[in-house]
Image (spheres, rainbow, N blue to C red):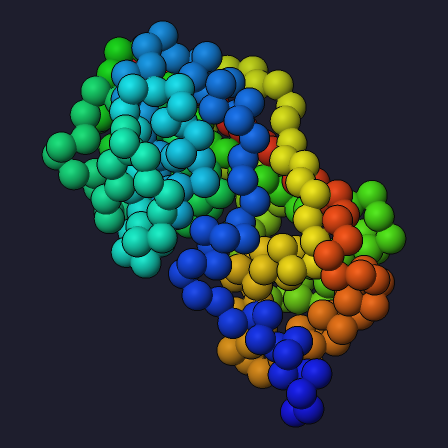
Amino acid sequence: MNEQQQKSLNWFIVNGDQYAKYRPKYPEALGKLLASLTQKQCHALDVGCGTGQLTQILANYFDHVTGIDPSEEQILNATLKDNIHYMSGFAEQFPDSIRHIDLVTIAQAAHWVDLPKFYTEAQRVAAQNSVIALISYGVFDSDSDIRERLHQFYYDDIGAYWPAERKMVDDGYRNIYFPFEEIPIQLMEISLQWNLEQLMGYISTWSAIKKAKSVGKEDLLIQFHQELSELWGVPTQLKTIVWPVNIRAGKLS
């Protein structure tokens, strides 16, 4: 492998801090919208919180927020705030200390959990008139000249390496099991101005990337990075990257 190929491949080596650095941030409007669904804004629970992308926004609208995630490494890299408490744990069994929750969220993680058990736990810890919200952001898009190559890479080059559960995210959780009285939600999106480093950092966090590397498909990753670099031009140039934000919200109690 030559020096240029090794440089390309280095983008696809993922450490825990890369999730905090490169995962797209939710818009502030999402926190405001979620808080508007609940009668009280005392305590929110963010399940599968990762490094706190959504948790920190909820903290602007709720008195107290608990973020819970099974990954200790994710928690160690989480964004801290005075009214946020992070803990390691699972969606299917909350600690006894969690109770009287006004809002339960699970963002970009509902496809990984045992939904019936998670819903049972959410109902167990729910306060009166509480709400549950499943949130996901779908396939990214761009209005620039990189759009076609991004889609080719996502759907064709590494399409076979996405876990089956990823289809639920691509569908916006529309067909996911959700036994609650639903609350209509307005459409929303994440729109960011990113340079080449930021986009490559985000792509490096994909589960399909890890799978492709594990089966020796480094050549796909190297070729993509080289071609994207050529299309991009000056690496510091900013391009618009957009993700649709899908929300399924319902009344817990």
Residue at horizontal 32%, vertical 35%? 81
Q: Tell which of 132 and 63 is nearer to you.
A: 63
Left or right position of 100 against 14: left
Q: Residue at x 59, y 49 (%)?
A: 167
Left or right: residue 89 versus residue 115 is: left
Q: Residue at x 80, y 70 (%)?
A: 227
Give the quadrant of the C terminus.
top left
Res 181 seen here: no
The quadrant the N terminus occupies is: bottom right
Q: Position of residue 92 (x, y in %)?
A: 27, 42
Residue positioned most to the left = 96
At 33% from the left edge and 15% from the top edge, which residue is drawn? 41
Which one is nearer the viewer's eye here, 43 or 122?
43
Q: Is residue 207 left or right of residue 155?
A: left
- Between 157 and 33, the one nearer to me in the picture: 33
Quarter holding residue 87: top left
Rendered location of residue 30, percent (x, y): 52, 25
Residue 5 placed where, x, y %?
Answer: 68, 83
Residue found farthest to the bottom: 1
Q: Toward which corner of the image does residue 131 lie, by quadrant?
A: top left
In this rendering, the answer to whether 211 lies above or below 98 is: below
When the figure is inspected, residue 231 is found, relative to residue 64, above or below; the finding is below
